Image (cartoon, coloured by chain):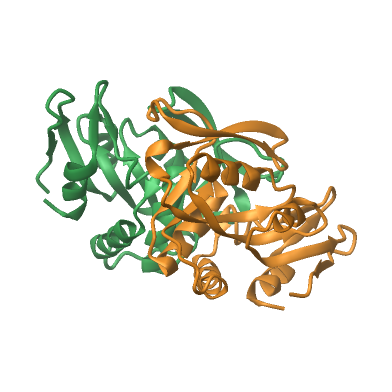
Chain colours: A orange, B green
Amino acid sequence: MNFLEERITKDGIVKEGNVLKVDSFLNHQMDIRLFDQIGEEFKKRFEGTEINKILTIEASGIGIACVVARHFDVPVVFAKKSKSINIEGDVYVAEVESFTHKCKNQVIVSKKFINPEDKILIIDDFLANGCALQGLISIVKSAGASVEGIGIAVEKGFQTGGQVIRNLGYHLESLAIVDSMDAATGEIKFREQ
Amino acid sequence: MNFLEERITKDGIVKEGNVLKVDSFLNHQMDIRLFDQIGEEFKKRFEGTEINKILTIEASGIGIACVVARHFDVPVVFAKKSKSINIEGDVYVAEVESFTHKCKNQVIVSKKFINPEDKILIIDDFLANGCALQGLISIVKSAGASVEGIGIAVEKGFQTGGQVIRNLGYHLESLAIVDSMDAATGEIKFREQ
């Protein structure tokens, strides 16, 4: 087990309905030392890949993305979930369905912040059905930029999001892939990597 | 002028209606090197203050808070803007009105993540009318924890939020306090600190 799988085993909580709660260290309370390790690991896994910008989605992707970005020395852009009066004019838009919140959101990125020459690393905390990720990829495509890699902290391997993205040929790295979990026993099985 | 005031002068855009757009480096695209400088500066300004946790609010506070947290070597908790099915049972709640989005939100923090012995540094990107900040303070109080300091990147000094918080005796540090700005000329005047 790697450091993240160990942490999930220790502090993750399995709930009915295939919910994995990692809110004590990943997406409500955030362990910044762990995020730093995540950054180090992504830096290794995307060694040799040219990246000049990280793209993530609010809210829980932002913390990981910002700490990871230090390891790549690049800025972060986050896709916003609702239209703000402070964002005007030209935005890229994608439709995103949230597994957690059971609702559809539009996410937007100002056109100013993704350019055709950008080499993007997408970072997010979770990958399940892949809707958020598909939205981010579609935004990068709209901008004519390229997705050089995708770094995910926790992938629910029993949902189809990761498989679809890999089938499409993207370089997707998930630090922990949960193949199954059992709310009754609390057991979590990770995919061998 | 300090490093943040210089950056605001260079890249901030003044819009009608007292809107200061800093979305190219602070709250949409995020300059992580700048965030690191912000973290260093807060570490200096809160020298000698015991802090074991940073509290912020989604979405744009999270990035700064996480990078700042590295300088204090503490975890970050962020207040969430809407009730998620993943947060259950016991949460602290505060009502927050957003200047930018012209709407009221409930923000919540799981009771698990703030304890009476916590010594909290609140971090946010903006302080204007102070509503978000008041909500965060009220959550810390509800938990019986203490607010040891408040670190803000940009304060709109011509709105009352900062004054009220200082009057209440909190140790509030804003790295850039905008005393006035002019949408016609683009001029931004900072308070001498």
User: A140 left or right of B2?
Assistant: right
User: A73 left or right of A106?
Assistant: left
The residue lying at 21 percent from left, 51 percent from top is B4
Using the image, determine if residue A106 lies above or below residue A126: above
The residue lying at 68 percent from left, 43 percent from top is A131
Report the front residue among A39 and A50.
Answer: A50
List the single residue furthest toward the bottom.
A1
User: B64 left or right of B162?
Assistant: right
Q: Position of residue A86 (x, y in %)?
A: 37, 29
Tell me which corner region of the image, top left, top right, bottom left or bottom right, holds residue A171. Answer: bottom right
List the single residue furthest toward the right.
A184
User: B41 left or right of A118?
Assistant: left
Can the viewer see residue B139 in this picture?
Answer: yes
Report the front residue among A90 and A19.
Answer: A90
Using the image, determine if residue B118 lies above or below residue B21: below
Q: Position of residue A43 (x, y in %)?
A: 50, 72
Report the front residue among B193 and A52.
Answer: A52
Q: Position of residue A13 (x, y in %)?
A: 75, 60
Q: How many numbered marks have been drawn onto this rendered protein structure?
A: 0
Q: Position of residue A69 (x, y in %)?
A: 44, 62
The residue lying at 61 percent from left, 41 percent from top is A135
Can the viewer see residue B116 in this picture?
Answer: no
The residue lying at 43 percent from left, 69 percent from top is A71
Tell me which corner region of the image, top left, top right, bottom left or bottom right, holds residue A74. Answer: bottom left
